[in-house]
Amino acid sequence: MHQAKKLAEYRAKKDAYHKSKLGQAIKAQRAKQYDQTERDPVAKAFYHSSRWTKVRDAVYARDMATDQVTGEVLGDRKVVDHIIPLRLCTAKQALDSNNLWVLSYRTHYRKTRLEQIISARPHGDSMLKHLDKRWWMKILREERGEK
């Protein structure tokens, strides 16, 4: 009981920090640095295009700002993910709303980590091209301990 109480207090403090102005400023600075130093230039240009912004906003509205795996309401954070990773998409799929869904940062991180593991396997990229939304939902819920 004591451990559960401490964990709840820790999570509340962590959430409050992430929502604070300082936490938001640090997060924005890290994102900017990632864009400038690590992100692929082609992906950077894509994610800064007006066409992507319009499609992203439409998908965010369609999914009602809700993580499609956990059902968590996200507020104003726009994490719209490609079901088939952008690097493997055709030009048409990259902006196809059927290939996009809203995820929380936590779910997106877990999905990206699994994509990296699958991609490292023999024929992994080919496999990623054929995984659909239902498969990802099943796997991400199982990993989270849900049915």
Image (spheres, rainbow, N blue to C red):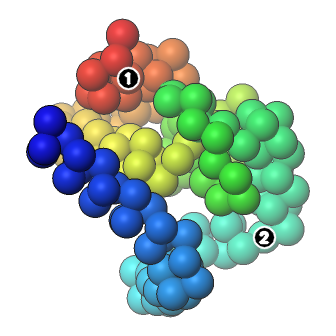
Q: Residue at x 67, y 67 (%)?
A: 47
In the picture, the quarter occupied by the C terminus is: top left
Does 62 sit left or right of 76 as displayed?
A: right
Q: Residue 113, image x and y in percent?
A: 29, 48
Q: Is residue 88 above or below residue 141?
A: below
Contact flag, marks 2 and 1 (Cβ < 8 Å): no
In the picture, the quarter occupied by the N terminus is: top left
Q: Residue at x 87, y 56 (%)?
A: 54
Q: Amino acid at mark 1?
A: Arg
- If you read the primary sequence from the N terminus, does the residue marked by circle 2 or circle 1 appear first? 2
Q: Residue at x 46, y 22 (%)?
A: 137
Does 51 sit left or right of 31 as displayed?
A: right
Q: Residue 33, image x and y in percent?
A: 46, 89
* Closer-to-camera residue (6/56): 6
Q: Amino acid at mark 2?
A: Ser
Q: Residue 92, image x and y in percent?
A: 74, 42
Rendered image quadrant of residue 101: top right
Q: Is residue 82 visible?
A: no
Q: CA distance from mark 2 to mark 1?
A: 32 Å
**Mark 1 surroundings within 10 Å by alpha-carbon count, few (fewer than 14), some (14 through 19), many (20 or more):** some
* Closer-to-camera residue (44/14): 14
The residue furthest top is 147
Q: Residue at x 54, y 77 (%)?
A: 20
Does 75 sit left or right of 122 as displayed?
A: right
Q: Which residue is mark 2?
A: 49
Q: Secondary structure at mark 2?
A: loop
Q: Which residue is mark 1?
A: 141
* Closer-to-camera residue (18/68): 18
**Mark 2 surroundings within 10 Å by alpha-carbon count, few (fewer than 14), some (14 through 19), many (20 or more):** few
Q: Is residue 137 above or below residue 50?
A: above
Q: Is residue 113 visible?
A: yes
Q: Secondary structure at mark 1?
A: helix
